[in-house]
């Protein structure tokens, strides 16, 4: 087994779209991306646009690192300074995806309503914090050390950036993810819960974990 970390290539964009979908779902059958784009075909097209399009955001390919297993992409995550890439950058990227799908104003408004429970419970990304997000692994590559290697790599980059605190989030109840994050030093400092989010998806909300760099 050969594990290697690398930057993103053009051919990785469909994989990164899958990673975004997996990261959004966590341990659940559905996630925030499913709320936003209920149709699977539209969701795949939208996530390819978000990951690989011209509009940068904290879900963009420019922030991803990829872990390969025997030469095949198996896992990925993003890591960035929230002072340089704000949480709000996802909005314009989403609108670019909506334009790709040619959604009309009615569909846009409906998507905003579906996404509201997520926005109420997803953690803030304070400026100056090293953010690690969008962690996803192919099912056949799990428990092979890929995420651990990516996390260690991301934290090393955070230390080089000068940030003093790193942050990551996971869905409440996603014990495998929380354990993986705790293994590298993260600890839960906050939970944001929303009754509508739990009704729609099955998790009460999100845990925010931090680590001193």
Image (tube, grey):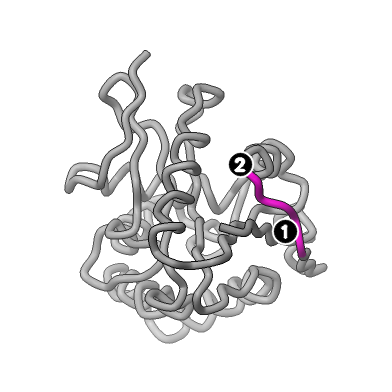
Secondary structure beneath label 2: loop
The relative height of residue 170 versus residue 95 in the rendered view (above or below) is: above
Residue lying at 27% horizontally and 40% vertically, measured from the top left: 6
Which sits in the foreground, 27 or 64? 64
The relative height of residue 45 versus residue 196 in the rendered view (above or below) is: above
Residue lying at 33% horizontally and 18% vertically, measured from the top left: 2
Residue 112 left/right relative to 74: right
Q: Which residues are magenta?
A: 184-189
The relative height of residue 213 versus residue 153 in the rendered view (above or below) is: below
Give the labeled residue for mark 1. Answer: 207
Which is more N-terminal, label 1 or label 2? Answer: 2
Q: Name the spot of residue 13 as percent of width and height, x first.
A: 27, 49
Which sits in the foreground, 75 or 157? 157
Residue lying at 32% horizontally and 58% vertically, measured from the top left: 51
Give the labeled residue for mark 2. Answer: 184
Q: Name the spot of residue 64 as percent of width and height, x first.
A: 35, 52
Q: Name the spot of residue 192 as percent of width and height, x first.
A: 76, 68
């Amino acid at each position: 087994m050969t594990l290697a970390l690398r930057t993103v290539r053009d051919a990785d964009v469909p994989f990164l779209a899958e990673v975004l979908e997996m990261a959004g779902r966590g341990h659940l059958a559905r996630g925030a991306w499913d709320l936003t784009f209920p149709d699977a075909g539209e969701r795949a097209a939208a996530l390819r646009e978000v990951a690989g399009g011209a509009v940068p955001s904290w879900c963009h390919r420019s922030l991803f690192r990829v872990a390969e297993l025997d030469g095949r992409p198996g896992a990925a995550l993003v890591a960035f300074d929230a002072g340089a890439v704000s949480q709000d950058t996802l909005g314009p990227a989403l609108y670019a995806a909506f334009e790709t799908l040619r959604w009309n104003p009615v569909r846009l408004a409906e998507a905003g309503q579906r996404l509201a429970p997520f926005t109420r419970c997803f953690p803030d990304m304070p400026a100056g914090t090293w953010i690690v997000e969008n962690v996803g692994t192919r099912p056949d590559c799990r428990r092979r050390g890929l995420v651990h290697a990516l996390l260690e790599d991301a934290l090393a980059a955070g230390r080089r950036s000068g940030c003093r605190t790193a942050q990551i989030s996971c869905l409440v109840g996603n014990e495998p993810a929380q354990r993986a994050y705790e293994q590298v030093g993260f600890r839960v400092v906050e939970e944001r819960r929303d009754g509508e989010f739990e009704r729609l998806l099955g998790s009460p909300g999100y845990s925010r974990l931090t680590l001193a760099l």
